[in-house]
Image (spheres, grey):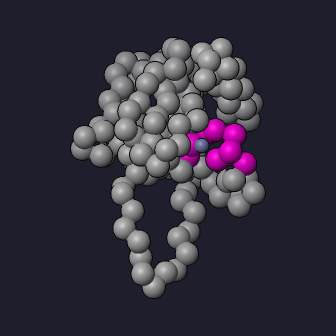
Amino acid sequence: MSHEGFRLVSEEQAKRADAAHAPLPREATEPVKVRVMKTEGTGMQIDWRDGHASHWTFAWLRTACPCATCHDEREKEGRPVGVARPEPASLLPLYKDPVRPDSAQQVGRYAISFNWNDGHTSGIYSWDYLRRHCQCAECKAAATA
Ligand SMILES: [Zn+2]
Ligand SMILES: [Zn+2]
């Protein structure tokens, strides 16, 4: 994949994520510290410029993938961001590796992307998108208020 193509897709994604909401203050979407706890498998943590800290599990991040394919799937199923598709009841549950990224890389100055261990790589998670989906008790309470 060329760098040019990569950028184009990510800008589209970022725009779509922004379209529905008023812009956030700059300090709220500027990470000071980004930690991807690959080895521990516990997820990603970001400390923001405005002093807020966010944490997302890898399972949440994977099901919240902002790429066009995952976005359309969620729309079609009416499934909110970050909610896994219900597993079909099975007599012989198959063992599945817990979802985690094999690697993660920053995309420009505004996003991060993951190479998930299930082979999916197309999601570009903008800081804005992540901050809007902060999973801390305070933000979740505000979102449902
Ligand atoms: Zn995706
Ligand atoms: Zn929060």
In the image shown, does 66 or 118 lie closer to the viewer?
118
Left or right: 68, with 126 as reference point: right
- Number of numbered discs: 0
Locate residue 64, reporting x and y percent: 55, 46
Locate residue 14, reporting x and y percent: 66, 27
Residue farthest toward the left in the current orientation of the protein: 40
Magenta span: 64-72
Residue 54 vertical position relative to residue 70 in the rendered view, above or below: above
Left or right: 19, with 112 as reference point: right
Question: Residue at position x 24%, y 44% from top?
Answer: 40
Residue 93 position by quadrant: bottom left
Q: Is residue 9 magenta?
A: no
Question: Residue at position x 45%, y 42% from top?
Answer: 116
Residue 3 vertical position relative to residue 37 in the rendered view, above or below: above
Locate residue 12, reporting x and y percent: 72, 26
Question: Could you tell me if residue 132 is visible in this image?
Answer: no
Question: Residue at position x 65%, y 14% from top?
Answer: 4
Q: What is the quadrant of the N terminus in the image?
A: top right
Question: Could you tell me if residue 2 is visible in this image?
Answer: yes
Residue farthest toward the front in the current orientation of the protein: 1
Left or right: 19, with 28 as reference point: right
Locate residue 135, reporting x and y percent: 45, 45
Q: Is residue 69 magenta?
A: yes
Residue 94 vertical position relative to residue 112 in the rendered view, above or below: below
